[in-house]
Amino acid sequence: MPTDREYAYRVLERLRKAFPDTRIDLECNPFRGLILAILSQNTRDAYAYTAYKNLERMIGLSVEDIVRASEEAIAEAIKPAGLQREKARRIREAAKFIAKMGGSMEAILDLPLDEARAKLMEIEGVGEKTADVMLLFYGGKPTIPVDTHIRRVSARLGLVDKGVGYKKIRRGLESLYRSEDYMDVHLLLIALGRSFCKSRKPICGLCPVGDICPSKV
Ligand code: SF4
């Protein structure tokens, strides 16, 4: 019987082979990344990206641009992402928060991990997942953001217990993998969830980990 870590790495290696081109195109600027993360809440990436480009064209994406703009103007620009009023308010509050911190997100991202997470979560609309995305992608911090795909897939694979909360899933995954693999774990579990391990009808027959998954149907 493989140990939990051996099994976890067997899964990861399979996923690396199955999704060799999985990577993320990062915005180079963390504040822009935060805007995109807020726009991505409860919508598809494509709609969020359209809204993001509109915002760039109509208002600009710097902290100053956003602070200067009205909530109504931001909402108008980001309509394609849905929940535009709420998201406009969050984006503006985030910009005001960063402005108060000196105008740059690096001051937060350079803090020790737990402190940085707590500080990010003081921004309205930034929950654990968005904070961890910022910390992993832009701060290079050892954390695994957990989204809806990762929650479902990691439980089905038996990597974490079913029905546990965000923190337990994150910590469970972090305990199974080395920190240099956290980015791949995050991206590849999402890729598996989108392609095969779908919420309603998982495609177990074609799944790259079908022969080792305890939930195969
Ligand atoms: S075998 Fe089925 S349940 Fe297991 S990870 Fe693959 S798609 Fe999901």
Image (tube, rainbow, N blue to C red):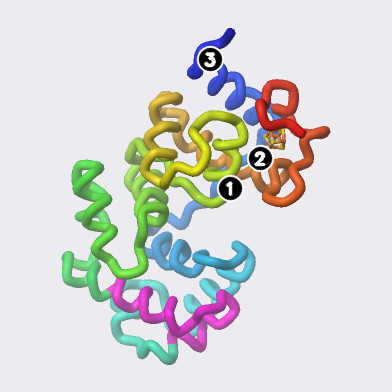
Pointer 1 and pointer 3: residues touching (CB < 8 Å)?
no
202 with respect to 151 (left or right): right
Over which residues does the magenta segment extend?
A: 74-95
Q: Is residue 122 highlighted in magenta?
A: no
Q: Measuring from the top left, give residue 216's x and y in whole percent.
A: 73, 31
Q: Measuring from the top left, give residue 197's x and y in whole percent.
A: 69, 42
In primary-sequence order, the first of circles 2 and 3 is 3
Which disc, if any, is residue 149? 1
Q: Measuring from the top left, give residue 72's x and y in whole percent.
A: 42, 91
**Within 8 Å: ligand 1 and the Cβ of disc 3?**
no
Give SS at disc 2.
helix
Query: Which of these two is toward me, 155 or 90?
Result: 155
Where, by quadrant of the figure, is residue 20 drawn?
top right
CA distance for labels 1 and 3: 22 Å
How crowded pointer 1 is (Cα within 10 Å; few <14, some 14-19, many 20+) is rated as some
Q: Which residue is mark 2?
A: 192
Q: Amino acid at mark 2?
A: Leu
In primary-sequence order, the first of circles 1 and 3 is 3
CA distance for labels 1 and 2: 8 Å
Give SS at disc 1.
helix
Q: Amino acid at mark 3?
A: Glu
Pointer 1 and pointer 2: residues touching (CB < 8 Å)?
yes
Q: Residue furthest right?
A: 205
Which disc, if any, is residue 6? 3
Relative height, residue 159 to residue 115 (above, below): above
